[in-house]
Each structure stands twice: as C-alpha cells, then as structure tokens.
Image (cartoon, grey):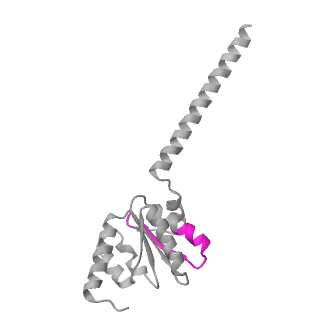
Amino acid sequence: MILKLKEKKNIIDKISKKTKLSLSIILANYNYINVNKIYQLRKKARKKKTIINVVKNKLFKIAIKNTKFSCIAEKLKGPTIIAFSMKHPGSGPKIFRKFSKKNKKFKITYAVFEEKILNKKEIKNLAKMPTKKEAIKKIAILLKEITIIKFLRTLSYIIKIKKNKI
C-alpha cells in the first residue's frame, strides 16, 4: 500500500506524540507471525497501558528524531513491531518476552530505556521490574512477616523468662 505524503505526516505525528509520553520502547521482528496472534498481542498490551504499532522503519526514524529514543534509529532493519510502555517501563518488555516464549519466530531485537539501548539481560531485568502496585504488595507482605517474626520472638523470650523463674 502506497501512502500519500499527508498520511505519512499523520503517522509521524502520532508516533512522535507516543514517544513523548512513553517511558520505554521495545522492538521486535514479527516476520512469520500471523495477524490473529498480533491482534491478540495488541489486545493484551492495551490492558497493560502499552501501545503496539507496526510502522515503516523510515517513518519511525523520522518520528524519533531528537527524542529520547533517537539512539535506536541506526539499528532499525526488517519488519519491526514497536511497543510503547506508557505507565510502567517494564510493561512492553514483559508482554513481548511472554509472547516470544510462545512464538519462537517472534524475535525481540532492541529496547530503549532512559536514552540507552538495552542488551538482552537488561531487557529481561526491565521486564521483571514490579509495577507500583506489585511493589506495595510485596512491601506489605514483608512488613507483615517481620511483625509476626518479632511477635514470635517476643513470645519465646517471655516463655524463656518464665521457665527460668520457676
């Protein structure tokens, strides 16, 4: 499909707006993945406040020029699908990693976070980063365990004191 100049400018504007709001991006080669699977991937991504787009590399390069993601411009090759993480920087990588485990032909190529291209290990760590809600839940559980342990220690100390007095 041949795009007219007006359509190209519209695409560039939309991508530019997304890059300004995005915390991180992740790119993958989606060659040999059918449309239904890509649709399901987009559906899951929307629930996690992540936007997925397929854009021509040339248009994407123009859109990210002079942004925090411009470092990735030279690396773009082949068919590329892009996930923009809007609320949590690890949401896009988490979704893509999970999808790539089920679809072996889906290859994660690059990710950018804080103006830096991430390697595979850093992408994995970013995907494992807990959300604010998950972190609060973990802290609450930890505090609960700490208070229970302190309570048990206090009880055992009281029992020891009583045994020694008798």
Residue under the point 27% across and 75% down: 13
Instruction: Locate the N terminus by quadrant.
Output: bottom left
Answer with the quarter of the image where residue 111 lies.
bottom left
Residue 57, percent from left and from top: 39, 83
Residue 20, percent from left and from top: 31, 66
**Residue 103 vertical position relative to residue 137 in the rendered view, above or below:** below
Q: Is residue 14 magenta?
A: no
Residue under the point 60% across and 70% down: 101
The answer to whether 152 appears left or right of 106 in the picture is right
* Furthest-bottom residue in this view: 2
Q: Is residue 99 magenta?
A: yes
Residue toward you, 41 or 100: 41
Residue 145, percent from left and from top: 59, 35
Residue range in magenta is: 96-115
Total numbered circles: 0
The answer to whether 15 appears left or right of 25 in the picture is left
Residue 72, percent from left and from top: 40, 75
Residue under the point 43% across and 80% down: 75
Residue under the point 51% across and 61% down: 127
**Residue 1 vertical position relative to residue 66 in the rendered view, above or below:** below
